[in-house]
Image (tube, rainbow, N blue to C red):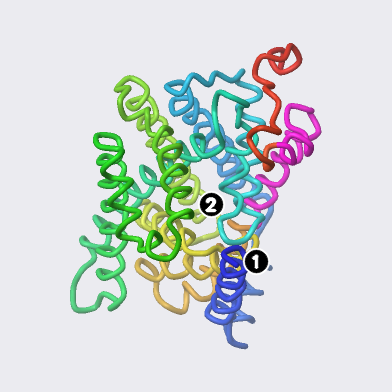
Amino acid sequence: MKLAVNIGLSLGMLGLCLWLVWPAAADRAGLARVLGALSFNTFAPYLAGYVALLAATHFFRAWRWRHLLRPMGVELPPVRLLAISSVGFMAILALPARLGEFVRPALLRQKGKVSAAAVLGTVAVERIVDGLLVSLLVFSTCFALRGPSAPGWMMPTAWASLGIFVTAMTFLLLALRWPDVTVRTSVRLSGVRLASPRIAALLEEKLHSLISGFRVLDDRRHLAGFVFHSVIYWAANGLGMWVLARGMGLDLPIVGAFATMGIIAVGITLPNSPGLVGQFHWFTTLGLALYLPGPVAQTAGLAYAIMLHGIQVLWYVGMGALAMITGHVAWDDLWRGTRDDGDRPDDFDRPDRAAA
């Protein structure tokens, strides 16, 4: 039922965002002119610069994960870490309803050592820290643009995104300091115990496993390393968006590129449409409209969103497929990983995995 609801929300988001972003006839003509006017010789250096920054974004996004895994006693060879991360990033992009977030935990669960729920805790730390960084970015840029001419959605959105992620970080810190009390209080407030004590007990067990993935917060060295690489990851991402915008002739200031990146990041935390189709494009034009005239954002800005999304899809699908071809991650790994913990053989100490 939960899966059906999530997929329904995802498909609903797809329809809504396609309706919002679908250009009028005049805008479609302008969109075609913008795409047709691109000169390969002029655009190629910017495209190469963007792809190089996208590669850096991909690497640091994957590499920072080791700082979350090591406090749990999980050590992966760099190539296998990159391969698992690449498959996970591909799944996050391709699958609806944020289902791709479960792929990396499923691939790393270890019989008798590390559960998928514990590894999922590291993913939760990623999302919360990313959310805080992005929310602070969105809030500061929106606050700088406040005024009578600012759109009405801007500041409420900034405050809401900041409030949500600050609340999530508060839960994370309380769970680390007082795990038993935090878990019991959370389950009680959810009302699950009134409906089914058995399900409430199971939920408490899963929450305790999830909290074990928060161990990095007790390790200042790894926490500092994770935050440092996260800042580089987001900086490379925003700079790449600015380079691509300049290549497409958009007079977008660099702060506008980072603000647009933040708005996209906040927007895709909602139940995502398959492949982020429509959703990515609408939030991109929404961010661009803060810095560019409306007609430009709806034509040249939409062309930019299509180009940006297309390149990212090709990159992440290509990197994920390459990881599968190299043999560092196999479909049967994912299949076994999605089954019960007791069915998952321990593969961290296998010679072939160590060689990887």
Disc 2 residue crowd, few under 14, some 14–19, many 20+, Cα 10 Å: many
Q: What stretch is highlighted in magenta?
A: 310-336
In the image shown, does 201 or 320 lie closer to the viewer? 201
Query: In which image quadrant can residue 272 be found?
Result: bottom right
Q: Name the residue under label 2.
A: 244
Query: In which image quadrant can residue 50 be found?
Result: top right
348 part of magenta stretch: no
Looking at this view, name the residue that lies furthest to the left: 147
Q: Is mark 1 on a helix, strand or loop?
A: loop
Is residue 223 placed above or below 21 in the rendered structure? above
Q: Is mark 2 on a helix, strand or loop?
A: helix
Tell me which secondary structure the magenta stretch mostly adopts. Answer: helix
Horizontal side, residue 308 vs residue 129: left or right: right
Q: Residue 99: percent from the left, percent from the top?
A: 60, 54
Query: In this rendering, which labeled residue sits more in front, label 1 or label 2?
Result: 2
Q: Which residue is drawn at 39% across and 45% down?
A: 130
Horizontal side, residue 56 vs residue 161: left or right: right
Horizontal side, residue 103 vs residue 228: left or right: right
Is residue 185 placed above or below 81 in the rendered structure? below
In the image shown, does 350 or 112 lie closer to the viewer? 112
Disc 1 residue crowd, few under 14, some 14–19, many 20+, Cα 10 Å: few
- What is the quadrant of the C terminus in the image? top right
Q: Residue at x 63, y 39 (%)?
A: 106
Is residue 79 placed above or below 172 in the rendered structure? above
> Marks 1 and 2, how far apart in space?
15 Å
Q: Mark 1 points at which residue?
A: 37
Looking at this view, name the residue that lies furthest to the front: 197
